[in-house]
């Protein structure tokens, strides 16, 4: 029996023999995949799903074979069950491509493998004929408590990418009787981090990667989250019991006022006042413009509100002024409900429900502090000492290497995008990484041959915001990989503004109005 596939699982390397090839995708062939189970690789279930409407996507999907599987099931620290679960779906109209659907947050669940992880407005990749795989990244604990187990941290951080990819490709080859001709990893947030991690650690796995809003420097961005929460909480009005209510630090009217003033200051920098700031890097905005001269009212910001807005946008630092993180863009998308959900929440109790408050508190105490500290409280984070407790997490969680030579030399392409008003992670951090990549890759021209970054005006974290957040990154990366058709622009649109299109330009260029033509058409702008 010929050994054709190598899987790296935990601490050992095993060579898995391929099953006899199956030429026809159907329910019988799907059921036969169960015999691929081994001592360490268990197929939990195989299911043939007939074509039709899918409740996960509200889209029509082709018939497909679904495989639920777990790699390396075991009990970890504290007798917590651990293992890399995945959902693999193989359509009967297979286009020959393999698609890894990136995760989100701290993972901890297997999301339906339909080909999400793309910007809004796109057909699920499964419906377009892609074989799609998703994973829990080694655990079922979205609260981060898997982090008490040292090995589980590494599996979540990077090892699951390789293990799940190789297992999935082996099943695809056995089922269809041929290997995928191209492989893609597409994800946003933690899925974007996984994409960057794959390009750095596993350059042979994927031909094309789409990394959206990548949280690639978590050992630092979580420090900045603590910085923001503490500063916002310090000025939050109190309830009758004297408890600060985070959601009240800024009203919706305050945020709308900021948004309008950012537009007034920076909208015209691209040659057109159209409600978008196309180059936030050139927007030298200071919220002191809105400071009240007298009593506080809804047409101005208090002294504390101005100071904290300046402080959180400047980025976190220690008492000596050493920066832990980069600044944040001032973008009119600050008025979008997504900014509130991430930064402030809407809880009227002393327990905040802002996404950052829960996600980072759990992440820091369980995953990013070494050793894990179950009693940690993010409101007590010490910016002089606690960052040192997080340094070890960079080894497994951060995807900061700018040496992509191995990925580049085998023909890999990576498309990165980031919303300018992202409240979860700063777009300036991603731009800073791209600048470093440019330096280490021989200059901008050499870098754009294989890696391009697109900053999206007024888009929030992965989607949403007050700008245009729908564009087809998957089609762009496929054309780049398979036809050498590099994306000179991405055309963005929005279901809320169907008559408008906007060009997304590869960083460091930005879109400027040509001076004539339809101002609502992407064709009237140039990237300069």
Image: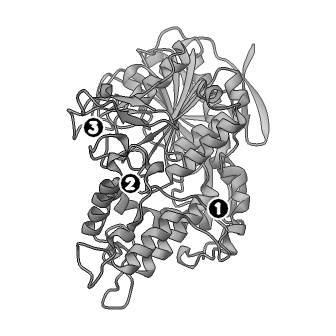
Q: Give the structural element (helix, strand or loop) at label 1.
A: helix
Residue that label 1 marks? 368
Which callout, 1 or 3, points at the residue further toward the start of the chain? 1
Q: Which residue is drawn at 35% across and 66% down?
A: 345
State the image coordinates of residue 508 (x, y, percent, origin top left): 52, 38
Q: Give the structural element (helix, strand or loop) at label 2.
A: loop
Front position in the image: 145 or 522: 522
State the image coordinates of residue 85 (x, y, percent, origin top left): 56, 41
State the image coordinates of residue 519 (x, y, percent, origin top left): 25, 33
Answer with left or right where residue 327 lies relative to residue 291.
right
Answer with left or right where residue 393 lies relative to residue 62.
right
Q: CA separation, marks 1 and 3?
A: 37 Å
Residue that label 2 marks? 331
Which of the numbered marks, if any, corresponds to residue 494?
3
Q: Residue furthest front?
A: 515
What crowding class fits label 1: few (fewer than 14 Cα within 10 Å), some (14-19), or many (20 or more)?
many
Which callout, 1 or 2, points at the residue further toward the start of the chain? 2
Where's the N terminus, which quadrant?
top right
């Amino acid at each position: 029996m010929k050994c054709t596939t190598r899987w790296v699982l935990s601490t050992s390397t095993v060579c898995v023999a391929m099953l006899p090839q199956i030429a026809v995708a159907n329910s019988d062939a799907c059921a036969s995949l169960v015999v691929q189970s081994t001592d360490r690789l268990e197929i939990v279930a195989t299911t043939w799903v007939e074509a039709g409407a899918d409740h996960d996507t509200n889209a029509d999907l082709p018939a497909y074979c679904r495989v639920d599987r777990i790699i390396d099931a075991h009990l970890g620290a504290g007798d917590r069950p651990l293992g890399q679960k995945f959902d693999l779906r193989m359509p009967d109209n297979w286009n020959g491509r393999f698609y890894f659907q990136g995760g989100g947050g701290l993972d901890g669940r297997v999301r339906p493998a339909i080909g999400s992880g793309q910007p809004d407005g796109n057909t699920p990749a499964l419906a377009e004929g892609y074989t799609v795989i998703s994973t829990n990244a080694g655990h079922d604990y979205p609260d981060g408590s898997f982090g008490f187990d040292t090995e589980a941290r590494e599996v979540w951080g990077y090892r699951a990418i390789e293990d799940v990819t190789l297992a999935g490709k082996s099943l695809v080859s056995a089922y269809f009787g041929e290997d995928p001709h191209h492989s893609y990893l597409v994800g946003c947030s933690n899925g974007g981090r996984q994409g960057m991690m794959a390009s750095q650690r596993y350059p042979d796995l994927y031909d094309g990667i789409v990394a959206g809003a990548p949280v690639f420097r978590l050992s630092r961005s979580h420090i900045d989250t603590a910085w923001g929460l503490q500063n916002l909480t310090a000025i939050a009005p109190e309830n009758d019991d004297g408890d600060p209510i985070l959601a009240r630090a800024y009203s919706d009217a305050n945020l709308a006022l900021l948004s309008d003033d950012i537009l007034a200051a920076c909208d015209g920098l691209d040659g057109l006042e159209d409600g978008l700031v196309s180059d936030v890097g050139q927007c030298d905005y200071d919220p002191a413009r809105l400071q009240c001269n007298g009593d506080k009212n809804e047409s101005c910001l208090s002294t504390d509100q101005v100071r904290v807005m300046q402080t959180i946008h400047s980025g976190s630092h220690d008492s000596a002024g050493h920066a832990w993180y980069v600044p944040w863009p001032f973008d009119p998308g600050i008025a979008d409900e997504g900014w509130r959900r991430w930064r402030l929440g809407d809880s009227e109790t002393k327990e905040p429900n802002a996404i950052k408050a829960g996600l980072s508190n759990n992440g820091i105490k369980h995953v990013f502090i070494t050793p894990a500290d179950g009693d940690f409280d993010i409101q007590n984070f010490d910016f002089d000492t606690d960052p040192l407790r997080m340094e070890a997490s960079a080894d497994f969680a951060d995807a900061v290497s700018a040496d992509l030579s191995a990925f580049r030399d085998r023909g890999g392409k990576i498309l990165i995008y980031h919303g300018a008003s992202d409240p979860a992670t700063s777009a300036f951090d991603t731009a800073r990484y791209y600048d470093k990549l440019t330096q280490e890759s021989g200059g901008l021209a050499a870098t754009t041959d294989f890696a391009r970054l697109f900053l999206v005006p007024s888009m929030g974290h992965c989607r949403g915001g007050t700008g245009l957040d729908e564009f087809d990154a998957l089609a762009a990366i496929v054309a780049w990989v398979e036809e050498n058709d590099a994306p000179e622009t991405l055309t963005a649109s929005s279901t809320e503004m169907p008559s408008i299109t906007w060009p997304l330009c590869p960083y460091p260029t930005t879109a400027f109005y040509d001076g004539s033509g339809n101002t609502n058409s992407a064709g009237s702008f140039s990237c300069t």
